Image (tube, rainbow, N blue to C red):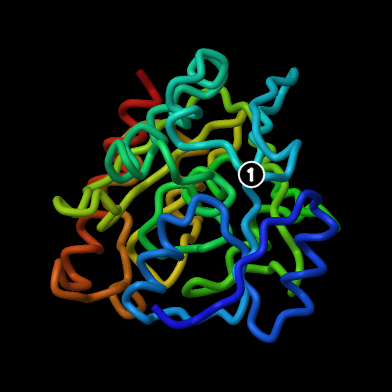
Amino acid sequence: MYEFNYHRPKTLEEASRTAKEAEDGMVLAGGMTMIPSMKLRLASPSDLVDLADIDGLKGITIGSDTVTIGAMTRHHDVHTSPDVGKAIPALAALAGGIGDPSVRHRGTIGGSVANSDPAADYPAAVLGLDATVETNTRKIAADDFFTGLFETALEDGEIITAIHFKIPDAAAYMKFPQPASGFAMVGAFVAKFGGDVRVAITGARDCVFRMTDMEKALAAKFSADAVADIAIAEDDLLADIHCGADYRAHLVTVMAKRAVAQAAG
């Protein structure tokens, strides 16, 4: 780990200003990615801005058609929330499958979404549930938020404060986990809103993405059979030591079918 300056601001304004003015400032939420990356010297921020002491960034609020989760809310709290479990069971279940108990008790939803790891679970829920990411300066639609490998639409000094999830008629998340880490080798989040369907895939490309062909097929017939024969191009899929692009293409279909079957009841 390289030398760095540690800051623990009391307000969101101070945190934003400190991160923006630093030579290479990084915001710390749960630290489940940042701290290991720093230990391995894969990340070397000049300044680390810890959000732990800032009020108003935790908590869950249920509205008539949305579930709002504060950015510093832990995965465990989302998973065990009776309100989330009733409004969006798929989101509660997803949170319960992240990493291991240590990660779930320290990791935060805002940190996970801001990190945009290609194999993370929460980005699939954000995109699949057509969520809105709220920051200290604006609101960003899910379709505009994730831009690439560990890249998002967040600007310097911009900090996620909450995420607003639309409550679907039905939804489910299924993933094929990497056995050691629990990350998704491929995960599929399917959500039905009236006659519209959204299908978000994580783990298969540089960042989460939507399967529009599947969405159209499911809008016409909400059944696992509707996506069974949709071709998945391998050209831009990830290939690594865990599996090749051809197997990931296969997993996209399998996980989507399982998610649809569960959502359909």
Give how far across and how far down residue 242 sits, in percent: 14, 67
User: Residue at label 1?
Assistant: 71
The front one of 110 and 205 is 110
Up-down relation of residue 88 to residue 6 (above or below): above
The front one of 172 and 92 is 92
Residue visible at 47% across and 47% down in the picture: 122
The front one of 25 and 161 is 25
Up-down relation of residue 164 to residue 78 (above or below): below
> Can you say which quadrant of the picture contains the C terminus?
top left
Give how far across and how far down residue 12 sits, in percent: 80, 53
In the visual, does 9 lie left or right of 215?
A: right
What is the quadrant of residue 22 in the picture? Answer: bottom right
Up-down relation of residue 95 to residue 35 (above or below): above
Give how far across and how far down residue 142 sits, in percent: 65, 53
Say what amino acid the circle numbered 1 marks: Ala
> Can you say which quadrant of the picture contains the N terminus?
bottom left
